[in-house]
Image: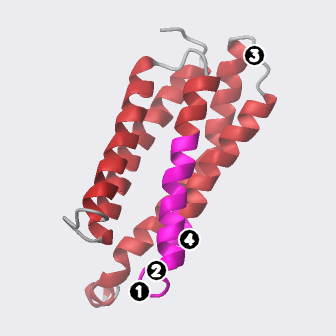
């Protein structure tokens, strides 16, 4: 019975993964904000506005992921691609703000973040103008890069919260 259910849900598994991941990222926004607050406080920087900014941007990434999952491209390609593109834009804004507004952020995180942005841009270029693969292929690559970044960033921001300087 479970196998039959999984087979019936086959076409929706990727979208379900987007929805669940978006919910997790949105839930993590408060934790990320808390760690940023602790890190900025340890560096004697008023965290109030920055924490709010980063929490909302992080939640925005998750919300865009969920919208892209809830609205498959076959249902409404404009909403789906708009949400997926919005996620990438919010992610890029998050990274650029982090590089500017989080003093003491490990250089490895900064470098990896810029590498992920470049990877997503290359993936998008391979999809749209070149046509090397379809929308789903580009989404898989972008999602994989964002997952990798998420793992690195959450770990690094936990260390950032301790106020350690590198």
Q: Position of residue 51 (x, y in %)?
A: 72, 34
The picture quadrant where one finds residue 39 is top right
Query: What is the distance, in whole Å, between disc 2 and disc 4 at their CAs?
Result: 12 Å
Residue at image mark 1: 74
Highlighted range, magenta:
65-93
Which is nearer the N-term, disc 4 or disc 1?
4
Q: How would you classify the magenta stretch by its main secondary structure? A: helix
Q: Residue furthest left?
A: 132
Q: Residues within 10 Å of mark 3 (few under 14, many from 20)?
A: some
Q: Position of residue 26 (x, y in %)?
A: 60, 54
Residue at image mark 3: 45
Q: Secondary structure at mark 3?
A: loop
Q: Nearer the viewer, residue 51 or 8?
A: 51
Residue 97 vertical placement versus 73 (above, below): above
- Image quadrant in which the N terminus is located: bottom left
Q: Residues within 10 Å of mark 1 (few under 14, many from 20)?
A: few
Which is nearer the N-term, disc 3 or disc 4?
3
Residue at image mark 4: 67
Query: What is the distance, in whole Å, between disc 3 and disc 2 at their CAs?
Result: 43 Å
Which is nearer the N-term, disc 2 or disc 4?
4
Is residue 82 located in the magenta-colored stretch of the structure? yes
Residue at image mark 2: 77
Decide: marks 1, 2 in contact (CB < 8 A)?
A: yes
At a point 30% along the width and 56% down the height, the residue shown is 125
Residue 145 vertical placement versus 79 (above, below): above
Q: Position of residue 117 (x, y in %)?
A: 40, 42
Q: Nearer the viewer, residue 153 or 128?
A: 128
Query: What is the distance, in whole Å, between disc 3 and disc 1 at their CAs?
Result: 47 Å
Q: Residue furthest front?
A: 129
Query: What is the distance, in whole Å, between disc 1 and disc 2 at their CAs?
Result: 6 Å
């Amino acid at each position: 019975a479970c196998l039959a259910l999984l087979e019936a849900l086959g076409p929706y598994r990727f979208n379900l993964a987007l929805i669940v991941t978006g919910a997790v990222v949105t839930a993590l926004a408060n934790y990320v904000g808390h760690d940023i607050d602790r890190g900025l406080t340890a560096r004697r920087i008023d965290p109030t506005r920055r924490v709010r900014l980063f929490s909302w941007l992080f939640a925005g990434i998750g919300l865009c992921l969920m919208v892209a999952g809830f609205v498959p491209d076959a249902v409404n390609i404009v909403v789906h691609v708009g949400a997926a593109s919005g996620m990438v834009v919010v992610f890029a804004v998050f990274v650029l703000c982090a590089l500017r507004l989080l003093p003491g952020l490990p250089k490895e995180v900064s470098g990896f973040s810029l590498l992920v942005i470049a990877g997503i841009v290359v993936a998008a270029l391979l999809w749209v103008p070149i046509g090397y693969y379809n929308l789903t292929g580009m989404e898989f690559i972008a999602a994989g890069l964002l997952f990798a970044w998420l793992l690195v960033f959450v770990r690094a921001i936990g260390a950032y919260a301790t106020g350690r300087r590198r």
